[in-house]
Amino acid sequence: MARIRLVPVDELTPALRQMVKDSEAHLMNPATYQAGGLLPETFQAFWDFYGPLKFGGLLDVKLKELVRLKIARLNQCTT
């Protein structure tokens, strides 16, 4: 199984370090942001697009996650 190297927190950009801190405060796994540290500009561009989709809008974040999981299951995707 291929593994993506996680960038140590102290080597991340200030923006990614803040994302790690925020994720830990919400008891979430910071590994996504550490992996994003391999290509910080690309990850920031992705996050500028994805962040508002996930955290903005009318639907609650938990409901969006349940919908995402249901769609993945219907399509036999591993999440």
Image: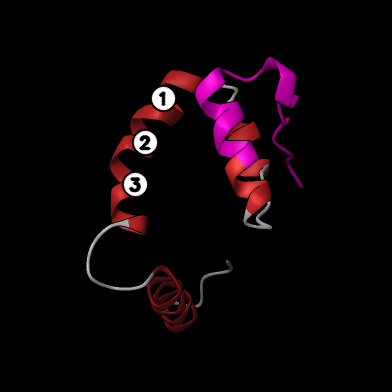
Task: Give the crowd class for mark 2: few <14, some 14-19, many >=20 residues within 10 Å.
Answer: few
Circle 3 — which element?
helix
Q: x, y percentage for residue 35? A: 63, 33
For this orientation, the residue located farthest to the front is 25
Magenta stretch containing residue 8, yes or no?
yes
Q: x, y percentage for residue 67? A: 39, 78
Circle 2 — which element?
helix
The range drawn in magenta is 1-21
Is disc 1 in contact with disc 3, using a CB cutoff of under 8 Å? no
Task: Give the crowd class for mark 3: few <14, some 14-19, many >=20 residues within 10 Å.
Answer: few
Amino acid type of the residue tagged 3 in the rendering = Tyr
Magenta stretch containing residue 5, yes or no?
yes
The image quadrant of residue 45 is: top left
On the picture, is 10 further left or further right than 39?
Answer: right
Q: Is residue 22 visible?
A: yes
Q: Is residue 39 visible?
A: no
Amino acid type of the residue tagged 2 in the rendering = Phe
Is disc 2 in contact with disc 1, using a CB cutoff of under 8 Å? yes
Q: Which mark is residue 56?
A: none
Amino acid type of the residue tagged 1 in the rendering = Thr
Between residue 18 and residue 74, name the one nearer to us: 18
Q: Which residue is mark 3?
A: 50
Q: Which residue is mark 1?
A: 42
Q: Which residue is mark 2?
A: 46
For this orientation, the residue located farthest to the left is 58
Q: Give the quarter of the figure containing the C terminus.
A: bottom right
For discs 1 and 3, the disc positioned in front in the rendered view? 3
Is disc 2 in contact with disc 3, using a CB cutoff of under 8 Å? yes
Q: x, y percentage for residue 32? A: 60, 42
